[in-house]
Structures are given as C-alpha cells and as structure tokens.
Amino acid sequence: MVHLRWLLKSCVLHPQRSRIVFVCWRSLSASVCLCAMDEMWGSPSLVVVISMWCDKRFTLTDFPMPRRAASVQPRLKITAPPTFARYLLVPNIDSFTTAHPEIAVEIFLSVPLYDLALAESDLEVRFGPGRYPNLQCELLFSEPTFAVASPKYLAQIDELKEPADLKNATLVRSALEPWQPWFEAAGLDWPEPTTGIRVDDLGLLQEMVRHGHGVGLARAHFARELIEAGELVRLFDVQTGAPPHAYYAVYEKQVLERPEVSLFLQWMKDTFGNL
C-alpha cells in the first residue's frame, strides 16, 4: 500500500471562467489534479487525473465519467368513457403518437354519468350535456341516434313495420341514451320507458341489443361494423336531430400551458370534429 502525505500546493481560480476550479496537490508519492467542471455537462462534475509514482498506473478509464441526466419525457394522462376509448380513441391514437413520439400517453377509463374530479388526468372526454361548472369544455362531436335490433330478436316478435309497433317490443334503456328524443322524432307522444333492462354504458347497451335482449338506440360510429356484418339491423328511417348528449373534451384551464396537453386537445378536435 502506498501511504500518501498530501500537501496543498496551490488553488487557482480561472479568471475568465469562474465555474472552473483547478487544484493541484503534490507529494513524494503522487501527483493529483482535480478539476470541478460544470460547464461541459451542465451540472457540477468531477474529473480526476492521477499519476502515481508506484507500480500501478492509472488512466482515465479507471475513473467513471459523469453521465448526463436522463431527460424527462412529457407525460399526458387522458380519461375517456370505455366505448369512446374502444371505438374511437384507440383506433386513431397512432396518428398522434407517430407525430409526437416524445410524448408518453396514458389512457384511463372513466365511469359514464359520474363527473369525477380531474385531479388524476390532464384531459377528460365526457359524454353528457356539456355543462360542467368551473371547467373548460369543448364539443368534440355529436351524431344522431337511431333504433337497432338483432336478427335473433326480430325473429321472436311481431314484425316492426313502423315506430308505433315498438309498443310490443322490449326497449333496452340507458340514461346515456334516453328514448324520449327519438320518440319525438318519430312522432310518438310516449314517456320515457321505466321498465326493462337498463345499462349505463353505450358499448354495453349495444352488446345487450346484439345478444337479442331487445331494441336499443345506437350511433353510427359504434354500430357501423355490426350493421355491416349483419349482427344488428337498423329499424325505420327515423333518427334524432340533436341528441341531448354528446362527447366533450373537459379540462382545467391551466393545463393548456403544457405543450403536450394543448397538442393533444387540438389533435382530438381535428380528428373527431370532422366525424
């Protein structure tokens, strides 16, 4: 073992670069130079160069160089109803992630009809009337509703020739998709149904109808594939003009100060606003 007796020889502060300090120690056994440099790596770092007058020789590879701190990737949390996420958000999200690979997108599911706080997300897609106090709200898109049923169910009941024939049918209900606006469009002075199966998710409502549990209301972007596949049948030439519920982007005003949030909001409006 080499015992070193360090003696401080000099300490010089560079007159032109106040962040670089050069210190040199000498002894009979070793010569050491220490440079504290924070201009090269952006944070205080230490480079050690040792020349030992002994059997073991040291090089720069014996001393690990400081590593640049990993950059923080912008992270964006989106909350959306299950049906919107499945049928619209997931099939289209690649156009955003391809354009902005530097942004990490996290998608969470929300519970329809329950306007929870935005504390856990940056942007939320809500299906509802579009009135949310103390929050910013922008319409994404709205589309009419129409009646659908499965071939299995239609084979079990009397033929449905006109809207009034629904008096003998089972109507699948949902607070998300009330029947009364459709009744009005069909010229029927009927109250909102109060009996029969009720579900509070549009995708679940569609599945109930597909499996033959009755007649339900649907929207084109969710039912198109099932209609084309023959699993659902559109009934009558009636649809609502302006349904009471639509999809909205909901957020707190200050989050738009973050570029990743404003970029995603604009992408949603461009993507879904033209449906």
Image: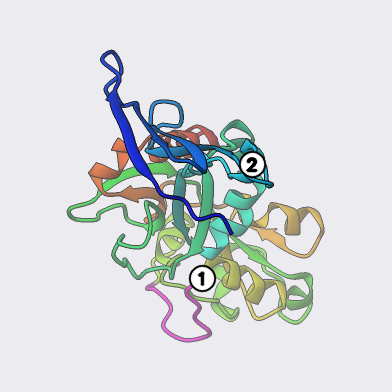
**Amino acid type indicated by mark 2:** Phe
Q: Quadrant of residue 169?
A: bottom right
Answer whether residue 193 is magenta in the image.
yes
Residue 231 appears at what percent x and percent y?
Answer: 78, 65
Instruction: Report helix, strand or loop for mark 2.
Output: loop
Residue 141, given in percent of the width and then of the height, sits at: 46, 43
Which residue is at a point 37% across and 73% down the rendered structure image? 191
Give left or right: position of 56 versus 17.
right
Residue that mark 1 sits on: 201
Q: Closer to the camera, 14 or 122? A: 14
Does any portion of residue 113 appear in the rendered image? Answer: yes
Say few, some or many: other residues with alpha carbon within 10 Å of mark 1 (under 14 / 14 to 19 / 20 or more).
some
Q: Amino acid at mark 1?
A: Asp
Count residues near mark 2 (Cα–Cα under 10 Å), then give few for <14, some for 14-19, many for 20+: few
Q: In whole angstroms, how far apart are the C-alphas of marks 2 and 1?
A: 69 Å
Q: Which mark is residue 58?
A: 2
Q: Residue visible at 61% across and 72% down? A: 215
Can residue 265 be seen at all in this image of the molecule? Answer: no
68 or 19: nearer the viewer: 19
Query: What secondary structure do most residues of the magenta stretch adopt?
Result: loop
Callout in the foreground (2, 1): 2
Numbered label tally: 2
| Position in image of residue 272 (x %, y %) | 52, 39
- In the image, the segment drawn in magenta is 191-200
Q: Of residues 30 and 189, which is closer to you in this image?
A: 30
